[in-house]
Image (spheres, rainbow, N blue to C red):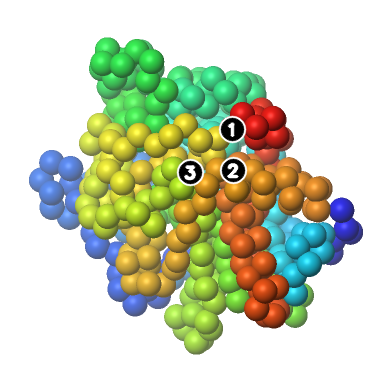
Amino acid sequence: MKVTKKFTLPESEIPTQWYNIVADMPNKPQPLLHPGTRKPIKAEDMEGLFAKELAKQEFSTERWHEIPEDVRTLYKIYRPSPLVRASGLEKALNTPAKIYFKNESVSPVGSHKLNTAIAQCYYNAEQGITHLTTETGAGQWGSAMAVAARHFKVGLDVFMVKNSYNTKPYRKIVMRTYGANVHAVPSPDTEYGRAVLAKDPTCLGSLGMAISEAVEMAVHSDNARYTLGSVLNHVLLHQTVIGLEAEKQMEMTGDYPDKVIACFGGGSNFSGISFPFLRHNFLDGKKTRFMAAEPAACPKLSCGKFEYDFGDTEGLTPLIPMYTLGHDFQPAQIHAAGLRYHGGGQIVSQLKKDGLIESYPIDQRETFAAGITFAQSEGIIPAPESTHAIALVIREALKDKAEGRDETILFNLSGHGLLDMAAYEQYMDGKL
């Protein structure tokens, strides 16, 4: 493990605005459609499900959105997050490439998810909402929501994919410690969950199912709203704080990224690191490549079909124009549960359709091998989701070595894997 160089910003450099890429996209995303009428919906149509300000952000075409001071104050607990030169990984690979990573694992819950959880809970609390529901795959999003909901004194029910509920028990305990109620999906606590269990009592769940249960509980509860951890435009908006900080930090290094890489589930951390740099391709003629690393078990951008589809399994959400494997798709129970989602977001799917971003499916064994290489060279054990990004970084860095290029690669370390050690043990014992 080699000593690495860290680039940090003072608290005063936390962005004061989020960046909305819709303002600069060559082709705007197609509209969301009402699940009943199949006609375009407006912000007010979503106010029964989301806080009014979040619904407004979802449909916004304004380039910049002010970050509320209360949100920035909470960001100061862990932001600005460091940018790190991965010199240990460079040495291990013997590559001429320069590798940098934005370390989002430093947040209190160990992932980037808190960036939007704080914002979503703030807007709901400001509106006087007293209860929230949400879904979670591996538990990072549920943990982030549990922290934020507790701070803003809002009740929270988290619907967690049953496979993760069973195999990642500490994530469940983290959420409960912060005061959230946690349900294993499919659960007996909603009409939809009971229907799934009646058909298949052994079902281990999916993110689509978890969303269906969370939405059902929200619409049937008093003064409640639903929150989502990825996919939707307002979620991606909040995550741009990552890339906006990284812009300033890359200036400190004297380098500019030739490639920006992140893992991809619904698009939140990929968009967060990518969108602020992508705007320079649009506006300033930069030629950076943006590369999404997705699981081979759930390769929606690489193998899915671009069409209107539901964001959940039951069909309660608006129809989203996206690359999808089908809202009833049941992916293999890989350990990167946060990436086991059937579709990409509206914005990211349009960018993929227009050839402005790239996607690469990666096998689970390759990702864990990459995670161990990173841990041994940089000292940080990455989350199974983040190992997908690292695997793609290693591929590209080795290409640079073979072809004699000295490119600059920036990737997002979306979270640590200290609550995922059972998965690493399975890989090392040859049982994955």
How dense is the environment of label 3, judged by Cα within 10 Å: few (below 14), some, or many (20 and up)? Answer: many
Find the distance from the CA under tag 2 to the CA under tag 3: 15 Å
What kind of residue is marked 3?
Leu
The residue indicated by pointer 3 is: 339
Q: Quadrant of residue 395?
A: bottom right
> Looking at the figure, which quarter contains the C terminus?
top right
The percent position of residue 429, horizontal first and vertical second, equals 69, 30
Q: Are marks 1 and 2 in contact (CB under 8 Å)?
A: yes
**Depicted 162 relative to depicted 46: above or below:** above
**Which element type, helix, strand or loop, lies under badge 2?**
helix
The residue indicated by pointer 1 is: 432
What kind of residue is marked 2?
Arg
**Depicted 170 relative to depicted 368: above or below:** above
**Which element type, helix, strand or loop, lies under badge 1?**
loop
The residue indicated by pointer 2 is: 365
**Depicted 334 relative to depicted 398: above or below:** above
> What residue do we see at 80% from left, 53% from top?
378
Q: Quadrant of residue 422?
A: top right
The percent position of residue 251, horizontal first and vertical second, equals 71, 77
Q: Which residue occupies the extreme bottom position in the image?
A: 285
Residue 119 is at least partly visible in this image: no
Q: Which residue occupies the extreme left position in the image?
A: 37
